[in-house]
Image: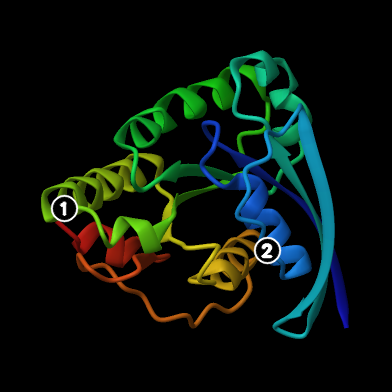
Amino acid sequence: MFRKYGTLALLGDVQIGKTALMIKYVNDTYDPHYKKTEGVNFMEKTIELDQTDIRFSIYDLGGSKEFENMLPLATQDAISVCFLFDLTRRESLENVKNWWKLVKLSSRNSNAIPVLIGTKYDIFLEMPKEHQSYVHSRSIQFAKSLKSSLIFISTSDSINVQKVFKILISKSFDLKLTIPEFFRIGEPILIHSTATLDSVL
């Protein structure tokens, strides 16, 4: 059994579900009541993947501007940086650009694998088709720009939660990845290969 270690960072605006995702994945619990992250939250988990024992730490950075100075703590040694946005709030998607720039400016870590994650997919499905279409195409454009995987999730409904971490860990440690991909409007988007991303839109 091989052993590997790593750090993952969750970044994004306030109230988009970063902490909820981390707790759901690590403890398999979900609390619908919002609790603001003060500074940086931290949790650990050990899994077995592709006959490899992997232990990793997850850093969840508060989305308020006052915590930007703590960004290096979350990203400096990260093997993967997850940029989260709320699928129901367009501005949180547009702000991914700002988070990307902050990481580039504040961290010397140029090897971290980016992952773009849209949260609250269950609510997103109830929104107007025009909104769904815009967010679908815009998020794919962002993923292409970042050269990242793109995944839509619902923490409350346990949609793609486990797959998010399986994908980013597999990519970070170059492990075998056989998860099916989805890229059409109305589907819980899950794109992890460059070939699929390039073929969409």
Residue 32 lies in what quarter of the image?
bottom right
**N-term-proximal mark, 2 vs 1:** 2
The amino acid type, in three-letter code, at marker 1 is Pro
Q: Which of the image's four quarters has the C terminus?
A: bottom left
Seen from the viewer's position, the closer of residues 199 and 63 is 63
Asked whether, in this view, residue 156 is left or right of residue 126, the answer is right
Image vertical order of residue 67 relative to residue 190, above or below? above
Q: How many marks?
A: 2
Q: Nearer the viewer, mark 2 or mark 1?
A: 1
Which quarter of the image is occupied by the N terminus?
bottom right
Where on the picture, by quarter, is residue 189?
Answer: bottom left
In this view of the protein, can residue 187 be seen by the observer?
yes
**Residue 80 seen in the current view:** no
Q: Which structural element holds mark 1?
A: loop
Look at 27% across and 50% down and name the residue there. Answer: 140
Q: In x, y percent, where is residue 35?
A: 68, 39
99 lies above or below 27: above
Question: 53 or 116: which is nearer to us?
Answer: 116
Of residue 73 and residue 105, the one placed in the foreground of this image is: 73
Q: Which mark is residue 128?
A: 1
- Circle 2 — which element? helix
The residue beneath circle 2 is: 24
